[in-house]
Amino acid sequence: MTTGTPSMGKMNNKKVHIRCRRCGHNSYHVREKRCSYCGFPAPRIRHYNWAKSK
């Protein structure tokens, strides 16, 4: 078994994010059980003032 670049090709077959039930974005982390876009299952929708467009 070699290390480095050949081993990196074996890491692309797992799904990290799936579609979120609340916002519909492909941002729900399967193992972490949290949406990176809306924060589901948090009761309030995730938002930050620095992310607002001017």
Image (tube, helix red, strand yellow):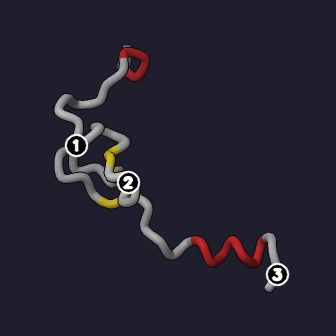
Q: From mark 2 to mark 3, how far is it between C-alphas?
A: 30 Å
- With respect to residue 9, does 24 lie above or below? above
Q: From mark 1 to mark 3, how far is it between C-alphas?
A: 40 Å
Q: Position of residue 12 (x, y in %)?
A: 56, 72
Q: Which amino acid type corresponds to the residue marked 1 in the rendered image?
A: Pro
Q: Of the residues under marks 1 and 3, which one precedes in the sequence? A: 3
- What is the secondary structure assignment of the residue under circle 2? strand
Can you identify the residue that label 2 sits on? 29
Can you identify the residue that label 3 sits on? 2
Q: Position of residue 50 (x, y in %)?
A: 43, 17
Which residue is depicted at the point 17% across and 33% down?
Answer: 43
Can you identify the residue that label 1 sits on? 41
Q: Which amino acid type corresponds to the residue marked 3 in the rendered image?
A: Thr
Q: Which amino acid type corresponds to the residue marked 2 in the rendered image?
A: His
- What is the secondary structure assignment of the residue under circle 3? loop
Give me the disc on residue 5: none
